[in-house]
Amino acid sequence: TTRELISQPPPRCTCDTGAMAAADEDSKEMMGEVVLASSGMLIQAGGIFELPIKVDRPSVLRIRFEVDEGYDVDFALKFLEDAEGSTPQTLVMPARSTAREGQLDIHTTGTCFVIWDNAFSWINSKSLTYHLSLKSKEDIERARRIEQKRLAELKKQAAKEQVIVRRQARANLIKELEGKLADMLAYEHEARGRLMAKQGELKRLEAEYNAAKAGIVAIADGADRAEELAAELQQKLSDLLEQAAQDEEDNALDTVE
């Protein structure tokens, strides 16, 4: 959208011409937005700087300025509609200001006059730094829709990236769990092997125990049998001795007779 600064009438200025040239160089138009900026605009003592801005559609004027070194000027805004016979309307009453920032909604077409007045000062010149931008409400709304669309796309992209991140995190978790499961299975296999080895050892020890127990029982049984044989031999010896004594007694009786 093309915007233009009004060239007639020219800015009414009692200021440094070199600074005015710098201000012209700082006037820019980009993407339907008129931007005017200057640093060190010198307003002479008793002088005034009036900057006209052509408004060809309902627009928003953003204003930011500062008077250097803490000085002040009278700041005001006036607007002249394009309608025939119209007279300038004061939008912002003159007020002493050292700095100011804000915006103005302009609902019709015409010319806006931004005024910095140093007429009250007959001694001190003032150095002014300002930044003005004018953009149509249509362009602002278009930019807002574009920004909304951009934000929606960013949100959509962020949602996709979040899905990818969640999937990757889930895949990493599954991989981690699979690794832990593999470790658990390996440990279980190893533990089972150790258990089977211990069970084999227990069976071997049980067999040895049973064999030793059987040997002990056999030995015990043999001892009992030996005692029985010894008792039988003792009984037979006693019987033989008793029989021998009886035979000797009988022989002695025979001799006496």
Image: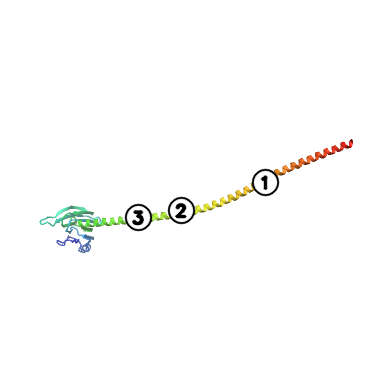
Q: Nearer the viewer, mark 3 or mark 1?
A: 1
Query: In 3D space, how far apart are the residues under numbered discs 3 and 2 (Cα atoms)?
Result: 26 Å
Of the pair 95 and 122, the residue shown nearer to us: 95
165 sits to left or right of 208: left
Residue 131 drawn at (x, y percent): 23, 58
Q: Earlier in the sequence, mark 3 or mark 1?
A: 3
The residue beneath circle 3 is 163
Q: Is residue 199 visible?
A: yes
Q: Nearer the viewer, residue 231 or 175?
A: 231
| Disc 1, SS | helix
The residue carrying pointer 3 sits among few (fewer than 14), some (14 to 19) or many (20 or more) residues within 10 Å by Cα, namely few
Tell me the SS state at disc 2. helix
Q: Position of residue 137 (x, y in %)?
A: 20, 56
User: Distance of mark 2 from mark 1, alpha carbons?
Assistant: 54 Å
* Amino acid at the residue labelled 2: Leu
Is residue 98 visible to us here? no
Q: How many marks?
A: 3
Label 3 to label 1, Cα distance in Å? 80 Å
Q: Does label 2 or label 1 sit earlier along the sequence?
A: 2
Amino acid tagged 3: Val
Q: Residues within 10 Å of mark 1 (few under 14, many from 20)?
A: few
> Residue visible at 64% across and 47% down?
214
Residue pointed to by mark 1? 218
Closer to the eye: label 2 or 1: 1
Tell me the quarter of the picture where residue 68 sits.
Answer: bottom left
Whichever of labels 3 and 2 marks the residue nearer the N terminus, that label is 3
Q: Residue at x 72, y 42 (%)?
A: 228
Quadrant where the N terminus is found in the figure:
bottom left
Q: Is residue 170 left or right of residue 201?
A: left
Disc 2: which residue: 181
Tag 1: amino acid: Ala
